[in-house]
Image (tube, helix red, strand yellow):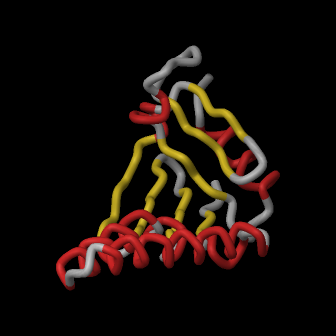
């Protein structure tokens, strides 16, 4: 089977309006910290805004191997075995891989969301379909 590796960077791949909203949100948090009239409030608002927008700004590398999905983000690397994935739900920006057979409220907490990035989404969904035993 083939291996596939791609990088997803939502800040690069998103529409211009989403970029404007993210920038405004960042400056709004800094403004809240500035209104506190203390450097501590400003630093707290700055670090909270960095944490909130981290998934949007920094790249995530996805690799699909024969039996595993590898997700690399900043300094972390996680491997997920396709044997534990029971269902998947593709949408416009990515695929939610779920450990549950039927839809559950816990999917967003226990599942893995794989963003397409600039890669061909039909190719990614096809590779996931081959590897997930539904």
Residue shown at the point (59%, 74%) measured from the top left: 24
Residue shown at the point (69%, 48%) measured from the top left: 127
Q: From this viewpoint, is residue 94 visible?
A: yes
Residue 29 horizontal side relative to residue 97, left or right? left
Extreme-top residue of the structure:
102
On the image, the x and y values in percent for residue 81 come to 41, 42
On the image, the x and y values in percent for residue 96 come to 59, 40
In this rendered view, identify the residue nearer to me: 72 or 82: 72
Q: From this viewpoint, is residue 7 visible?
A: no
Q: In the figure, 22 relative to 86: above or below?
A: below
On the image, the x and y values in percent for residue 124 come to 71, 53
Q: Quadrant of residue 40?
A: bottom left
Residue shown at the point (62%, 22%) measured from the top left: 134
Extreme-bottom residue of the structure:
39
Q: Quadrant of the N terminus?
A: bottom right
Residue 24 horizontal side relative to residue 89, left or right? left
Residue 110 horizontal side relative to residue 12, left or right? left
Q: Quadrant of residue 22?
A: bottom right
In this rendered view, identify the residue nearer to me: 108 or 63: 108
Q: Report the number of discs.
A: 0
On the image, the x and y values in percent for residue 53 come to 47, 68
In this rendered view, identify the residue nearer to me: 110 or 49: 49
Residue shown at the point (54%, 69%) measured from the top left: 25
């Amino acid at each position: 089977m083939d291996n596939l590796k791609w990088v997803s960077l939502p800040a690069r791949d998103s529409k211009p309006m989403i970029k404007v909203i993210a920038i405004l949100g960042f400056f709004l948090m800094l403004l809240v910290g500035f209104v506190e009239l203390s450097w501590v409030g400003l630093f707290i608002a700055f670090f909270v805004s960095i944490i909130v927008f981290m998934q949007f700004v920094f790249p995530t590398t996805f690799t699909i191997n024969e039996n595993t999905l590898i997700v690399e983000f900043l300094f972390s690397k996680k491997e997920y075995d396709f044997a534990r994935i029971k269902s998947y739900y593709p949408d416009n920006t990515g695929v939610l891989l779920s450990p549950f057979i039927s839809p559950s409220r816990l999917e967003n907490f226990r599942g893995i969301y794989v963003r397409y990035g600039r890669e061909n989404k039909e190719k990614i969904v096809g590779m996931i379909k081959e590897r997930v035993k539904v």
